[in-house]
Image (cartoon, rainbow, N blue to C red):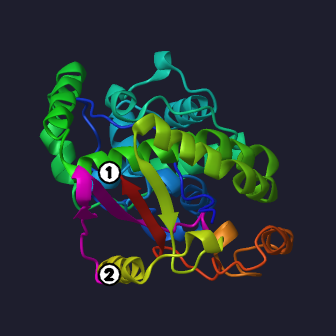
Amino acid sequence: MRFLLLIVLAFLVSCKDSKAPDYSKKNSKTMLAKSHPGEKLMKAQCYACHNPATPHAGRIAPPMIAIKKHYINEETSKEDFIKEVVEFTLNPSEEKVKLRGAVKRFGLMPKQYFKEEDLKQIAEYLYDYEIEEPGWFKEHHEGQKGKGHYQKGKHQKQKRKRKGKNGKAIGYNIATKTKQALAKNLIGTIQKEGTVAALKFCNVEAYPITDSMGVELNAEIKRVSDRPRNAKNKASQEESGYITLFQNKINDGENYEPIIKKLSQGKTRFYAPIVTNQLCLQCHGKPDTHIDSQTFSTIKELYPKDLAMGYDVNQVRGLWQITF
């Protein structure tokens, strides 16, 4: 089974002491936001990593509101903001990093292959309009004001160290690093060669990459689903129940925690949901609505018994099953 496009790569997160505009006030353009092309592009191209709906503990990159809050102050012009976002996204480097906490936590964002015009539309939309922010973000952002970057990074490092034997923290760390390893190759293939090429890449490379991360992190890493693309990854009855549990919590707008099971011989098993976003629907959405005819034909060729289509956004596609 291949969970194409459900991996992510890290971008930017940290907090900067700046005089940011008050985004809680209604922008005069807010009602027109739905018509701006940057909104659709942002959700399709950025939400794989920067989705505001992702729980704080399981994030692999900040929500887009974090970029807006920390890249814009009272002196930032629209032109400067667009330029900085485009240049960093196309050519990330340590010298250009403004939010150093992100690099400490997630690593430097890999080079991207988005169209420059698309990035300009996204940055323009981000600058001009109010965007969704997670419920936890305001408190987190306000709590970090006035703290130096290095002090903050040291605090986070110590906090992670204290949690070193916590099953939830270990599981999230393994899942995040595995997603990042997959993303370095897969996302680049999508951007440069398209969805069909990415499907073929995933068919050949996803298992070896996942297995190599398991060796590196001393864990057994699997992804299981009640509607698998590959029958070898079919969820057990118990795991299917977990999928339903997580989906019900998402439907009800509730927060959820990973499921931790203690096994014999001192082992622990971690389960966390893999939740679809707009980008995922290119391969896991509805044929003719989200999946084009060429991609559909390739899926059927590579996975004749595929059950992994027909999803919409914010649906539990499957689970990370990690044993350590």
Location of residue 208 with respect to 295 vertically, above or below:
above
Dot 1, how many residues are within 10 Å of its Cα: few (below 14), some (14-19), or many (20+)?
many
Relative to 130, 256 lies left or right: left
Q: Is residue 9 visible?
A: no
* Residue, far front: 265
**Residue at figure coordinates x 60%, y 54% from the top left:** 45
Q: Residues within 10 Å of mark 2 (few under 14, many from 20)?
A: some
Which residue is identified by label 1? 171
- Magenta span includes 316: no
Q: Residue at x 53, y 35 (%)?
A: 85
What are the residue bounds of the magenta stretch?
A: 252-280
Is label 2 in a helix, a strand or a loop?
A: helix
Closer to the camera in the image, 250 or 163: 163
Residue found 29% across the figure and 43% down from its top: 21
* Residue linked to disc 2: 245
Left or right: where 39 falls relative to 60: right
What percent of the width, then of the height, locates residue 30? 43, 65
* Quadrant containing the N terminus in the rendered view: bottom right
* Total marks in image: 2
The reply, left or right, for residue 204 in relation to residue 222 is: right
Kind of residue at badge 2: Leu
Q: Give the CA separation, mark 2 to mark 1.
A: 19 Å
Q: Is residue 267 above or below residue 90?
A: below
Residue nearest the observer in this picture, 138 or 299: 299
Counting residues from the start of the chain, the first of labels 2 and 1 encountered is: 1
- Position of residue 14 relative to residue 46, above or below, is above
Instruction: Locate residue 279, reporting x and y percent.
Output: 60, 62
Under mark 1, the amino acid is Gly
Magenta stretch contains residue 261: yes
Residue 280 on image: x %, y %: 60, 65
* Numbered mark located on residue 97 in the image: none
